[in-house]
Image (cartoon, rainbow, N blue to C red):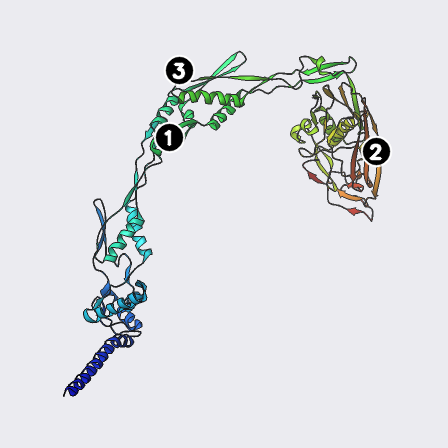
């Protein structure tokens, strides 16, 4: 009996044990089976704003949500407010929309995001809890909103434009009536970033509401101009008097308010509380311009003496006496006026508004008050060329050019410029038309013959040993000048003849023209330096023959006339060497290089003239403005 009882209880325990095991296995397997059924699908009970998404794939859920996004948008309006002004917008006005894909993804991650919350075991527990919560009680997921940042920014910037106000800068207005100060005033600026954050916070809460615009105060860079106005009025209320003293004579000029206000310059300077104040300073450039205008009116250039030398009496003749000049020291005058105005700007009670300007005397370069001190006592050098056979027009121009140098005196150490004294080669300056060489042909132009004068001056300077600083040879060998290599052409104002007076005395230039003998001489008088000059014979090379003669028509010639005006010259390179020996044993050698082009004979013919059968006809005689 007892054995049967033990057997009965044994089988009962076994069955119970197996039942317990089966129940446990079912409980353990159920979640896994549930998850297996929802692989790739949203768990049951998950919903978005009442729309059930359980059992749907991510793509299906996205499609369902996309078709109903309008119902998910928050309806509560958002109001932006500043003072008594307000602006109300719906979420759609602010560029808010529902992101269907992101919302479906959030729903799909319900019951699958536990692994991100801790250890794997804790994550599994959380996922199972979320799955149970969704299946048993439901699991709402909020729609994921997206904001069009460009649209939101546009709305906020539009509001900011209505609210923002630039600060008013302190200013100073200087008019004919005086200086008036305008006080500065602060402005305001909407903090767009803070406003954006507040709006996004309300949108995410889906409740709507009111956002008070965060506004920052903007201070002007310049707050005060009162001190500047006081300074400016201190100047404008004291008309400046400029006393101009020229010798014993004093001339007064008043600088009125209209001019004074243009001399004042407004500048910022540090003020209290990191702000700036306006200050007034004197605009030195405007003062200088005024002083320069005064100088133009009152400056007087010094007048050099014009001198001649009486060879027979061996003494200087004053043709025109020298006269001292005067000049205003522009820098000193500008500084004096600026300092006077600066004193007024400092509101000095005893400041004077009168400035006395003094002119400085200018000594003439060539002073006739003491002729003996000039050192002009003897012939230093001389140059001569010949022009016999020249046309009357050429002779006229030679005489005219030579007369330009009557009375010329070169101080020690200064440079002589032929163009400075001869002036413009024009009819207004006394020159007339004549035949000149223009490029590669003969033409009619003003001033033919002037180069005879420059060549004569050049030869005197060369034979006197003076340093030649600029010289240009003619383009071809000119018959008037004898042996080639010592000619000098000029063409005002660019082609010049220059040399330096390197002696310790003044150098008097004395021209002499003998029209009867066809001779021009330039003599230099001064103090003869202790030196000797040797000139070599011309060294000729690279000789090239000219082309055949050319015939040019000249309608001014008598009918049937043929007249030769140019004679053929070989082209050649010429070097003339000059050796200067001084008393102290110093030797200097100069080389004057001339490169002459071949020059053909030129014949002019009048109407109806009979020309050689092989004559080469050139263009008619032309006119040109300069030699």
Left or right: 259 as drawn, with respect to 507: left
Q: Earlier in the sequence, mark 3 or mark 2?
A: 3
Whether residue 226 is visible to the viewer of this picture, yes or no, is yes
Q: Quadrant of the C terminus?
A: top right
Query: Where 312 falls versus 499 (above or below)?
Result: above
Circle 3 or circle 2, nearest the eye: 3
Assess disc 3: are there few (<14), some (14-19) or many (≥20) residues with their C-alpha within 10 Å of its C-alpha.
few
Q: Which percent across, then down, holds residue 94?
A: 27, 56
Label 1 SS = strand
Image-quadrant location for residue 301: top right
Q: Residue furthest top?
A: 248
Quarter in which the N terminus is drawn = bottom left
Q: Residue at x 25, y 57 (%)?
A: 203
Q: Position of residue 273 (x, y in %)?
A: 33, 33
Lower sequence index among marks 1 and 2: 1
Query: Residue tagged by mark 3?
Result: 350
User: Label 2: how many residues lie within 10 Å, few (<14), some (14-19) or many (20+)?
Assistant: few
Badge 1 local density, few (<14 within 10 Å), some, or many (20+)?
many
Residue 278 is labelled as: 1
Mark 2 lies on a secondary structure that is: loop
Q: Which mark is residue 483?
A: 2
């Amino acid at each position: 009996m007892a054995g049967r009882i033990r057997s009965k209880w044994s089988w009962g325990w076994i069955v119970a044990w197996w039942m317990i095991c089966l129940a446990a296995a079912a409980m353990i397997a159920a979640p896994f089976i549930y998850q297996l059924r929802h692989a790739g699908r949203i768990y049951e009970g998950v919903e978005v704003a009442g729309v059930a998404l359980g059992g749907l794939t991510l793509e299906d859920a996205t499609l369902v949500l996309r078709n109903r996004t309008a119902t998910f948008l928050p309806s509560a309006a958002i109001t932006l407010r500043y003072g008594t002004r307000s602006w109300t917008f719906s979420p759609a006005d602010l560029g808010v929309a529902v992101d269907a894909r992101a919302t479906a993804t959030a729903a799909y991650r319900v019951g699958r995001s536990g692994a991100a919350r801790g250890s794997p075991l804790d994550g599994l527990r959380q996922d199972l809890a979320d799955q149970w919560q969704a299946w048993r009680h439901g699991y709402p997921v909020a729609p994921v909103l997206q904001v069009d940042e460009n649209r939101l920014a546009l709305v906020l910037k539009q509001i900011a434009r209505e609210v923002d106000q630039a600060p008013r800068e302190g200013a100073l207005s200087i008019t004919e009536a005086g200086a008036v100060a305008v006080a500065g005033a602060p402005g305001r600026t909407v903090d767009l970033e803070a406003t954006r954050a507040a709006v996004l916070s309300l949108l995410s809460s889906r409740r709507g509401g009111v956002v008070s615009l965060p506004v920052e105060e903007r201070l002007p860079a310049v707050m005060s101009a009162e001190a500047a106005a006081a300074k400016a009025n201190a100047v404008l209320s004291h008309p400046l008097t400029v006393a101009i003293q020229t010798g014993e004579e004093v001339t007064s000029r008043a600088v009125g308010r209209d001019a004074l206000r243009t001399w004042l310059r407004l500048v910022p300077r540090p003020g209290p509380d990191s702000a700036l104040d306006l200050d007034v300073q004197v605009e030195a450039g405007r003062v200088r311009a005024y002083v320069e205008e005064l100088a133009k009116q009152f400056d007087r250039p010094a007048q050099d003496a014009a001198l001649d030398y009486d060879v027979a009496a061996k003494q200087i003749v004053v043709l025109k006496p020298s006269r001292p000049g005067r000049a205003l020291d522009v820098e000193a005058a500008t500084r004096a006026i600026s300092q006077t105005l600066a004193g007024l700007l400092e509101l000095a009670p005893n400041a004077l508004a009168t400035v006395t300007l003094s002119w400085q005397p200018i000594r003439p370069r060539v002073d006739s008050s003491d002729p003996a001190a000039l050192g002009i006592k003897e012939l230093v050098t001389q140059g001569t060329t010949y022009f016999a056979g020249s046309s009357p027009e050429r002779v006229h121009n030679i005489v005219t050019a030579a007369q330009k140098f009557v009375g010329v005196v070169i101080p020690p150490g200064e440079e002589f410029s032929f163009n400075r004294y001869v002036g413009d080669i024009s009819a207004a300056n006394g020159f007339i038309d004549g035949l000149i060489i223009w490029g590669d042909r003969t033409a009619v132009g003003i001033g033919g013959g002037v180069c005879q004068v420059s060549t004569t001056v050049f030869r005197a300077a060369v034979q006197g040993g003076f340093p030649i600083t600029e010289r240009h040879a003619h383009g071809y060998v000119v018959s008037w000048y004898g042996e080639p290599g010592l000619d000098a052409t000029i063409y005002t104002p660019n082609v010049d003849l220059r040399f330096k007076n390197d002696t310790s005395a003044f150098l008097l230039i004395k021209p002499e023209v003998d029209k009867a003998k066809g001779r021009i001489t330039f003599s230099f008088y001064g103090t003869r330096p202790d030196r000797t000059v040797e000139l070599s014979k011309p060294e000729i090379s690279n000789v090239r023959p000219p082309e055949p003669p050319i015939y040019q028509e000249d309608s001014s010639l008598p009918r049937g006339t043929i007249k030769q005006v140019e004679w053929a010259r070989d082209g050649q390179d010429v070097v003339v060497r000059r050796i200067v020996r001084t008393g102290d044993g110093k030797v200097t050698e100069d080389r004057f290089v001339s490169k002459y082009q071949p020059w053909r004979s030129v014949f002019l013919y009048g109407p109806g003239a009979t020309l050689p059968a092989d004559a080469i006809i050139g263009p008619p005689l032309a006119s040109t403005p300069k030699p």
